[in-house]
Amino acid sequence: MATNAIKFFNNSDTSLIAAHSSSVCLWTFDVDKRNIYKEKFNLGNLKREFTCITLNEDDSLAYTGTRTGDVVFFDMKNKRYNYASQMKLKNGIKCLSYIGKTQNTDLG
């Protein structure tokens, strides 16, 4: 399982989200117990190769770019995917950037 991108949470020093080749995982660090916990997100029937990832300002939504050119949205509370965008970029998505307050996501 190759890791294509990671993003630390905006509001936590002990959590990050990782976009792997075919999965998305939440990693949480327990500093007191010196443990690392991994939770895989429920993708249902969705099959994608994830290339990049970003979070909104309150860490409630994750946006992942895919090699097929769509954006997949994840609900951070339930650890599962919400939906995939209808729009697809021809050459895939290589990077994402969340622009706060306007709730826009730049694609590249």
Image: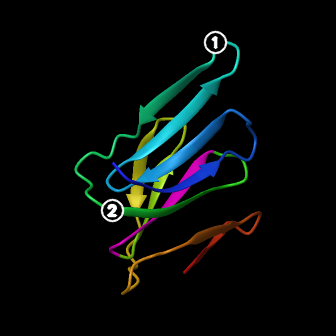
Q: Residue furthest top?
A: 33
Residue at (46, 76) in percent of width and height: 93
- Looking at the picture, tell me which residue is in the foreground, 63 or 27: 27
Residue 34 at x, y percent in the picture: 63, 17
Q: Is residue 67 magenta?
A: yes
| Amino acid at pointer 2 | Glu
Q: Residue furthest left?
A: 45
10 horizontally vs 106: left or right = right
User: Circle 1 sits in a helix, a strand or a loop, which is it?
Assistant: loop
Task: Pick whichever of labels 1 and 2 is earlier in the sequence.
Answer: 1
Q: Is residue 106 magenta?
A: no
Q: Residue at x 64, y 69 (%)?
A: 97
Q: Which residues are magenta?
A: 60-68
- Residue at (27% x, 45% y) in the render: 44
Instruction: Locate residue 38 relative to residue 7 in the image: left or right.
Output: left
The vertical placement of 8 against 56, above or below, is above
| Viewer-nearest of discs 1 and 2 | 1
Residue tagged 2: 49
Q: Which residue is mark 1?
A: 33
User: Please, which residue is most extreme toward the bottom here?
Assistant: 90
Along the line of sight, the residue nearer the viewer: 2 or 98: 2
Q: Identify the amino acid type marked 1.
A: Lys
Q: Is residue 57 above or below residue 38?
A: below
Residues under labels 1 and 2: Cα distance?
33 Å
Within 10 Å of the Cα at label 2, are there few (<14), some (14-19), or many (20+) other Cα atoms? some
Q: Secondary structure at mark 2?
A: loop
